[in-house]
């Protein structure tokens, strides 16, 4: 006999989000252990860790009412993942960023801003995928992304991401808070975010980071 975990679409989405949160915590735990054991390089670790942290933040925000405590969630599902909880909940940045902080304040400032930019890019893209398309949901995400890009001195003023975010913020500011992006607008915004993210990542090695 088939057992249904959900009774409606909302419950189904909740359980799917639970499964994704579970997977993110497990993946982070494995990544942390692999990094400690030198199974992955620092650069590979940092890239993957930043993605996991960004995905986690988006999901944790979405589930904030149903999962107020990540630690309790981990206990409920008998997840023995202390390294992941530390990285995702307590620290919020990859271990490599923390290590650089100990070595150099100026270097870690730059690294932390890069990490912040990556997280803001992924959070914005994830939110669109989760159909968070109301102006009062999208505007703060793009505003945070724009602010973090402007803090990074290695990017030129006419950098694609800065220009496109300014254009979108200007467009959204003329709309009402409860207005929603059309499917076409949401698709275009996601494309612009993805394009800007790729340009951003490509710009980093050239800037010597």
Image (cartoon, grey):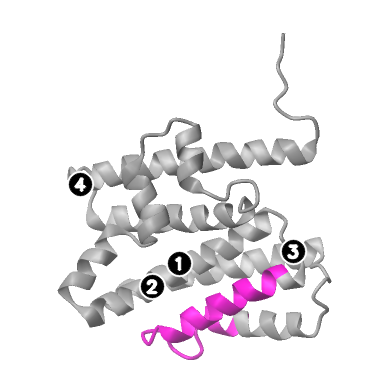
Which mark is drawn over residue 114?
2
Q: Find disc 1 in the rendering and name its residue.
A: 118
Q: Is residue 12 above or below residue 206?
A: above
Q: Is residue 45 magenta?
A: no
Q: Regarding mark 2 in the picture, which secondary structure is present there? A: helix
Q: Regarding mark 4 in the picture, which secondary structure is present there? A: helix
Q: Find disc 4 in the rendering and name its residue.
A: 36
Q: From the top left corner, tell me how far across and down residue 141 is, in percent.
A: 61, 71
At 70% from the left and 41% from the top, the residue drawn is 13
Proximity of marks 1 and 4: CB atoms separated by less than 8 Å? no
Q: Is residue 186 above or below residue 176?
A: above
Q: From the top left corner, tell me how far across and down residue 172 is, in percent.
A: 74, 79
Q: Give the main secondary structure of the magenta stretch.
A: helix
In space, the residues marked 3 and 2 are separated at their CA atoms by: 26 Å
In space, the residues marked 1 and 4 are separated at their CA atoms by: 23 Å
At 24% from the left and 82% from the top, the residue drawn is 106
* Residue 206 shows in this picture: no
Q: Find disc 3 in the rendering and name its residue.
A: 133
| Crowding near the residue tagged with mark 3, few <14, some 14–19, many ≥20 C-alpha atoms within 10 Å | many
Of mark 2 and mark 4, the one earlier in the sequence is 4
Q: Which residues are magenta?
A: 137-164
Proximity of marks 1 and 2: CB atoms separated by less than 8 Å? yes
């Amino acid at each position: 006999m088939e057992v249904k975990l959900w009774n409606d679409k909302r419950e189904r989405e909740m359980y799917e989000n639970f499964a994704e949160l579970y997977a993110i915590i497990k993946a982070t735990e494995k990544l942390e252990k692999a990094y400690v054991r030198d199974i992955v390089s620092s650069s590979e670790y940092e890239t993957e860790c930043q993605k996991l942290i960004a995905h986690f933040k988006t999901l944790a925000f979405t589930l904030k009412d149903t999962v107020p405590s990540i630690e309790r969630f981990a206990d409920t599902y008998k997840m023995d993942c202390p390294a992941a909880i530390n990285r995702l909940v307590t620290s919020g940045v990859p271990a490599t960023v923390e290590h650089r902080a100990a070595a150099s304040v100026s270097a870690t400032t730059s690294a932390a801003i890069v990490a912040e930019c990556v997280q803001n890019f992924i959070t914005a893209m994830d939110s669109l995928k989760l159909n968070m398309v109301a102006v009062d949901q999208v505007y703060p995400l793009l505003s945070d992304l724009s602010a973090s890009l402007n803090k990074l001195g290695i990017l030129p003023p006419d950098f694609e991401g800065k220009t496109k975010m300014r254009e979108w913020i200007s467009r959204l500011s003329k709309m009402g808070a409860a207005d929603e992006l059309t499917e076409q607008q949401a698709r275009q915004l996601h494309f612009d975010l993805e394009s800007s993210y790729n340009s951003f990542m490509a710009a980093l090695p050239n800037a010597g980071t």
